[in-house]
Amino acid sequence: MENKYIPLSEEEFIELKGNLEGIKAFLPEHLMGHFWEKCNRIRGERINQPCGCSSAAGLWGDCVAVLRKFVNERS
């Protein structure tokens, strides 16, 4: 049976889905590293994590969009 959550495990997917449910306009600092790491894995890239300041908001918005798309396609 194929794992539809690759490159994440099923447990990582469930955790990610739960974390995304609470995200609206503000991304809590304690989730930034977690989200960025998952985003890199899903995209198949190694991009350094941006800062949490407003100048990086576009990068974080793109990251959350990638994660939401991944979750929606596999739910």
Image: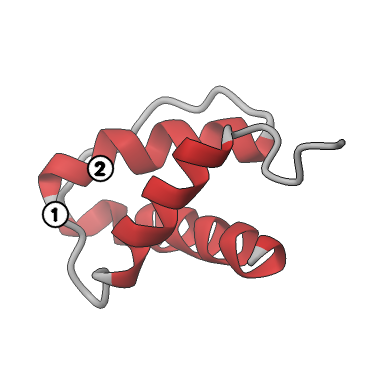
Query: Of 74 and 56, which appears nearest the observer?
Result: 74
- Give me the residue at 24% from left, 55% from top: 55
Q: Residue furthest right?
A: 1
Relative to 33, does residue 24 appear above or below in the rendering?
A: below
Amino acid type of the residue tagged 2 in the rendering: Met
Residue 56 x %, y %: 29, 52
In the displayed structure image, the side of residue 64 where residue 53 appears, left or right: left
The reply to whether residue 22 is visible in this rendering is yes
Q: Quadrant of the N terminus?
A: top right
Q: Amino acid at mark 1?
A: Pro
Q: Residue at x 85, y 37 (%)?
A: 2
Q: How many marks?
A: 2
Query: Spatial distance from mark 2 to mark 1, Cα to Cα?
Result: 7 Å
Give the residue pinned by disc 1. Answer: 28
Which residue is the extreme one toward the bottom?
A: 24
Q: Is residue 22 above or below residue 5?
A: below
Q: Is residue 65 left or right of residue 27?
A: right
Query: Please, what secondary structure does the residue beneath circle 1 have?
Result: loop
Residue 39 appearing in the image: no
Tell me which colouring the rendered structure shows.
secondary structure
Give the position of the C terminus as an image quadrant: bottom right
Q: Looking at this view, name the residue that lies furthest to the front.
A: 1
Q: Which one is in front, 59 or 8?
A: 8
Q: Which residue is mark 2?
A: 32
* Image quadrant assignment for residue 28: bottom left
